Amino acid sequence: MEAGFEYAADDIVLIASDGRVKGVPFALALKSGAWAMIEKLRPEIGEAAVHSRPDGKRVRYLNAPRTVYSASVPVGWIVFIKRASNVPAKLAPLGQLETISRLIDGAYSPDGKLTHQGFHAIKRTLADAKSFELQYSDAAQARDAIVDLCDG
């Protein structure tokens, strides 16, 4: 958001049968391990109240803009994040097989099974998308890598 992107979701998107996605706009929750990293970009996070989630994680919530991007959109990029210590931000391209494997691993359905329709929806989502893994330790560098991806 600090770089001008619109907020659509924190972790969860719904994939329609045509492959388009729509974010589920939960509050932006920052786990304790990310506080120092994000505080460089959003100093107010250090003053935010600490909450304990039902899963035992300690989180702080960032204020998101009141206008939330709620339209269903095609996917141009999929970026899987990987935080690491003392590494420069780097986007590494992922193949379609690796991407679909990661998406299936992270998919949810009430009965725990991916349906034929669900698999094809994921396949349609990937049809025109490029996928990357973003490894980083500095949030500002990660932001710059994403901005460069969009500008390139």
Image (cartoon, rainbow, N blue to C red):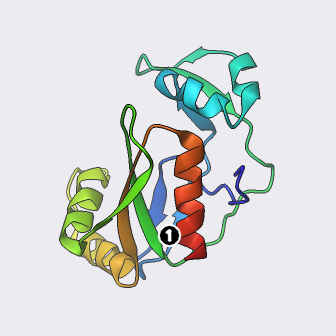
x%, y% of residue 126?
Answer: 34, 77
Q: Is residue 57 above or below residue 147?
A: above
Q: Residue at x 45, y 20 (%)?
A: 57
x%, y% of residue 149?
Answer: 52, 69
Q: Residue at x 74, y 28 (%)?
A: 43
Q: Is residue 23 visible?
A: no
Relative horizontal placement of residue 22, taking residue 49 as reference (left or right): left
Q: Residue furthest right?
A: 66
State the SS at label 1.
Answer: strand
User: Which image quadrant for residue 123?
Assistant: bottom left
x%, y% of residue 133?
Answer: 35, 57
Relative horizontal placement of residue 92, taking residue 78 as reference (left or right): left
Residue 107 or residue 62, whichever sits in front: 62
Q: Amino acid at mark 1?
A: Val
Relative horizontal placement of residue 10, taking residue 65 as reference (left or right): left
Q: Residue at x 31, y 55 (%)?
A: 107
Relative horizontal placement of residue 83, taking residue 114 as reference (left or right): right
User: Which image quadrant for residue 41?
Assistant: top right
Residue 91 or residue 33, whichever sits in front: 91
Disc 1: which residue: 21
